[in-house]
Amino acid sequence: MKFLMKWSFWICITFILQANAWGADSFKVGILDLQKVFSASNEGKRVYAALKEKQEALQKKLTAKEDELKEFQKELEKQSLMLSLEAKEDKQKDFERKRRELQYLFQDINEDMKKSEMTAQQQMMNDLKVVIDKIAKESGYEIIFEATRSNVVFWSGKADITEEVVSEYNKMKP
C-alpha cells in the first residue's frame, strides 16, 4: 500500500512538472498537515479531551479488576497451606478464570478505544472535507496533499494551508 502511494505521488508530481514545462497555466498545489489540524482545532481539542476522559474511566475499571485479581492471588497463597488439594485446585481454576476475564476486558477496552478514535477522526474528516473543498475552490488549488501520508519531503511555506484550514474549521465548529 505504501509502495502504491509513493508511486502515485511521484506520478502526480511528474504531471505537475510536465504541465508547467508545456507552458500550461500555473498549477497550484497545497500541503495540509492533518495531525496539526486535529491537535490545533477547537473540535480536535474537544474530541481529544473526550477520548482522554473515556480512556481514564476505562483505565480505572481495568485497574480495579487488576487489584481484585492481585488480592485474590494473595488470598490463594495465604490459604494454600490450609486448603485440601481439591479446594486448592478449585481456587486455582477460579484464579485462572478471573485472569482470562481481565485479559478479555483489556482487549475489549483497547478495541473500544480504537473504535472511538476512528469514529471521531472519521467525523472530523467529514467536516474537514467541506472546509478543504471550500478553501481549494476559493484559492484555486488543483491538488492538496496530506503532509505525512503522501511522503512529502519538502514544501515551501506558501504551499502549507494548515493554518487556513484550522481557522476555517474553527469558524465552522467554534
Image (spheres, rainbow, N blue to C red):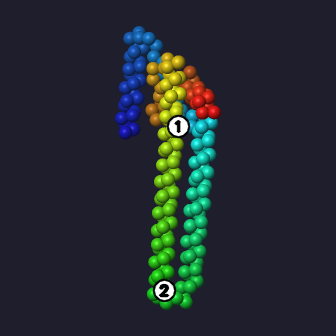
Q: Circle 1 sits in a helix, a strand or a loop, which is it?
A: helix
Q: Give the vertical position of 96 relative to 18 (above or below).
A: below
Q: Give the vertical position of 100 relative to 19 (above or below).
A: below
Of the two numbered discs 1 and 2 on the same chain, state the one appearing first in sequence: 2
If the image is split into quadrants, where does the N terminus sit?
Answer: top left
Residue flagged by tag 2: what amino acid is it?
Ala
Image coords of residue 144 (percent x, y): 47, 26
**Closer-to-camera residue (40/61):** 61
The residue under the point 59% across, 69% down is 67
**Closer-to-camera residue (130/33):** 130
The answer to whether residue 42 is left or right of residue 24 is right
Q: Which residue is labeled 2 in the image?
A: 87
Residue 60 visible: yes
Q: Circle 2 sits in a helix, a strand or a loop, which is it?
A: helix
The residue under the point 58% across, 53% down is 55
Q: Which residue is labeled 1 in the image?
A: 124
Q: Is the residue marked by circle 1 packed among few (<14), some (14-19), or many (20+) residues within 10 Å? A: some
The answer to whether residue 45 is left or right of residue 8 is right
Image coords of residue 41 (percent x, y): 61, 35
Image coords of residue 133 (percent x, y): 49, 25
Residue flagged by tag 1: what amino acid is it?
Met
Image coords of residue 68 (percent x, y): 58, 71
* Nearest-to-viewer mark from 1 and 2: 1
